[in-house]
Image (spheres, helix red, strand yellow):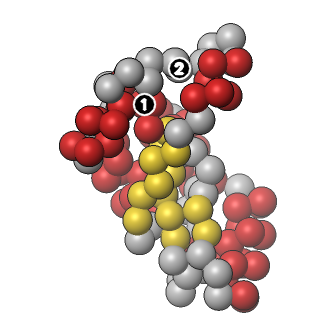
Amino acid sequence: TEINYILASAAQETGIAMGVGSQRAAIENQNLEDTFKVREVAPDILLFANLGAVQLNYGYGIDECKHAVDMIEADALILHLNALQEALQPEGDTRFKGIIHKIESI
């Protein structure tokens, strides 16, 4: 929580945009939502919500994407691609096949 507030405050002071880290944890555990909510300290910045695109191949859809945006009062959504990181993690989500079509549908 603290690091997000610090980064958001700095973004507000300098007038730059900010994207939060992946909100997957907060989508799956609502108790974590407050750790991403920075709009109160950065009311004027361009703020991006963020989810891993690969999650679209694991059941995420428009509802989860909208939830991520609404959760932090974001202006837009980033769907990040991190195939190498996922492939190197023992618990990584590696079903990237067809992901472009899922992104397109969002």
Mark sitting earlier along the chain (2/1): 1
105 or 21, which is in the foreground?
105
Task: Look at the picture and state if 67 lies above or below 17.
Answer: above
Which residue is tagged 1?
55
Which residue is at 42% across, 51% downward?
A: 68
Q: Which residue is rendered at x = 52% and y = 45% of the image?
A: 80
Residue 29, horizontal then vertical, whole percent = 50, 35
Residue 1 vertical placement versus 59 (above, below): below
User: Residue 42, located in which quarter of the rendered image?
Assistant: bottom right
Query: Which mark is on residue 43?
Result: none
Seen from the viewer's position, the closer of residues 77 and 72 is: 77
Q: Amino acid at mark 2?
A: Asp
Label 2, label 1: how many angstroms apart (C-alpha)?
8 Å
Residue 49 placement, left or right of 12: left
Q: Is residue 93 above or below residue 101?
A: above
- Where residue 83 appears, x then y in whole percent? 58, 29
- Any part of residue 8 in sight: yes
